[in-house]
Every structure is written in structure tokens, then in C-alpha cells.
Image (cartoon, rainbow, N blue to C red):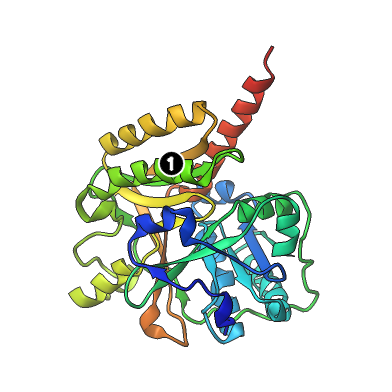
Amino acid sequence: MIDSHVQPRRAYDEFSLVLDPDAYEPLPDDWLIGITDVVSSTLAIKAGLYEDVNFAGASIIAALGNAWGSFDFPFVFRGDGAAFALPPHGIMAATSALRQVANFARTDLDLTLRIGLLTVRDIRTSGRDVSVARYAASENATYAMFAGGGLKWAEQQIKNGRYLVKPGRYATRPDLTGLSCDWTPFPSQRGEILSLLVEPRDRTSPEVFAALAKRVLAIFDAAPRQSHPLPGGIPTHGDSGKQVDAKGWSAVAANSDFRKFDDGLRLTLDCTREQIDRVEAILVPARARGEINFGLHRQSHALMTCLVPSDRPDSHLHFLDGMGGGYARAAEMMEEGALGDIVRHHDP
């Protein structure tokens, strides 16, 4: 279990509240930050391996929670990867789990999973921070939200070859008990499944970004069911044809992570083209002012990967992404936008 004195004191049950900077509490310097991501994930997705990419992305959460004996640690699912935080005495569990899931991705899924581990102190030395808030999606499911720009910086460093965890020579199989992705993809009911990433630029104050993020969120929240990508009716459970009852499906939808804050907004939504146009009318000028960068990707279906923690099965968690590339494609668009800004900045 994580030491209670470094846990955020309050879990917010209204998502807009975790957009406020005051909702976050810094992690201690000696805590560990782990990062994973699937190398060349967009190519794998284009080859139809979107379920495998998401499964590989979520695998570290399941493996680490099962090894640690608790899922009571901050983590975030990012589609083609994940990030987590652990106290310093978790270094052996973290290193072992990272090596195990990288080996599993390679041998079972034919995917290369990049894995890295560093400390919060390493991140703060760069001028970034890692702070955490807790969002109660339901009475039983609480997700960690991250702010401070530290995870984004750490991910970039790991992609550049720093802080990498070397593969283990004799890695055992990870314990992925509770992890599954056997739901049939969910078609949009309102026009588009939207994957949206919105991040502040380095010089943008948290207050300015929070105000902009709330404007964006208000457009989606005004729609039925807050633009939730899962259907209101009970869908079919994968190829088995198994179904859940109305109460069970309501719990699945309530415990999903379709909205999160991970150094910026990270949303998977079912929305209309008009909503997307209205949001772009906010984001494009903000990007031109140098306040934010953003990426979005439209697709026809949403995809769900599920985790039922062994220590608290009622706290089942459901990770959502877009089936047509989702967060990976939105991140690709964001990187292209950032590169374009650099080119324009250097034009004579």
C-alpha cells in the first residue's frame, strides 16, 4: 500500500474540479515514475492491431498492481502506453513488472514496448513537476490525474533513450490477472468517436489553461450523458454473446476513464461534428496565441480494455480509446502541429 501521507487528501467527484491547479498535490522527490509506450504504435494500429496495442498499453497497470498486491497507486492509461508512480521501496517490483510486460509484448503480441523508470527528483531538476489529484468516477472507481508537465517530459526523455530499463535476460511472464479486452468495439451514436489531447505550452500558466479547458469541457458536457462514448443501452459482450444486466452495465460505464487530466486534457468522446467544430474554434486560436497545442482524431468506434483488480473487484476499471488510432493518432497530430510552429518560428 502507498503511504497515506502522500496520497491526495480528497477525491473529486466532479471532473471539472480536477482542472483547477489547487486540486493537485506534489509527489515526494524520491518517488518513482514509470513510463511505457508501444514503439511504432500507429503502424500497428493501421495493420489492425488496435486491440493488441491497447492491451500492451494497459499491461503494466495490471502486472504492477498484481505484483504490488494493491492497485492503490497513481497510474494513467494512454492508449499505446501508460504511466505510474510508486514510492521508492517499489523499485524492484516496478523494474520486474516493466521487464515482464516488455517481454510479453514482444513474444505474445509481436510489439515492441519501450519501458523507462526515473525519479520525481530527476523530473524536477528539468524544471517540471509531478503532482497528483484523485478523480472519483464513481463510488468504487477512482483515477489519478497528473499535472506539472513532468510525465510529458519524462516520456520524451525515454523516447530519446534516457532512463530506459534494460530488458531482463530471463523475464518471467507478467501476472495479468483481471485484464481483458473482450468487448466488441462500440460504434458512435452521435456522429464521431473523438480522441482529443490538449496540452499547455511551457509558458502558459495553469490558471489560463484551466479556464480554456473548462470552456472545451463545457461543450461536451452539455450533450446527453456528457458525450460518453459507451452506449446507454446494454451492448453484447464480445464474441461470446454474453450480456450484463442494466445495473452491471451502468457500473461499467460509470467506472470508465473517458475523461482524464494527464499533463493536459485527454478525452475519448462520442460527439457531433458541430461539437468538434465549436471546440476547434476555441483551440485553433489558442494554439496560434502560443497557449496550447492539441491533437484530435475522429473515428467510428471506441474500444474498451477492462481491469478487475484482484484486491477490490468492485473497483473494476475500464480504459477507453478510439478504435481507429485514438490517442496515438491524436498525439501524432499534436507533434505535427508543434513541428509546424517551430518551422514558422524560424521562417525569415
Residue 278 versus residue 248 in the image, above or below: above
Give the SS element for disc 1. strand
- Name the outermost residue toward the top: 348
Residue picked out by circle 1:
297
The answer to which of 144 and 187 lies nearer the viewer is 144
x and y percent of residue 298 in the render? 39, 41
Task: Give, as a three-letter code, the residue at label 1.
Answer: His
User: Residue at the spot x=71%, y=56% of the render?
Assistant: 124
Left or right of 257, for residue 145: right
Left or right of 65, for residue 12: left
Residue 227 versus residue 122 in the image, above or below: above
Displayed quadrant of residue 212? top left
Residue 87 versus residue 290 in the image, above or below: below
The answer to which of 174 and 115 lies nearer the viewer is 115
User: Residue at the spot x=62%, y=20% of the render?
Assistant: 344
Query: What is the crowding at mark 1: few (fewer than 14 residues within 10 Å), some, or many (at least 20)?
Result: many
x and y percent of residue 214 in the render? 36, 46
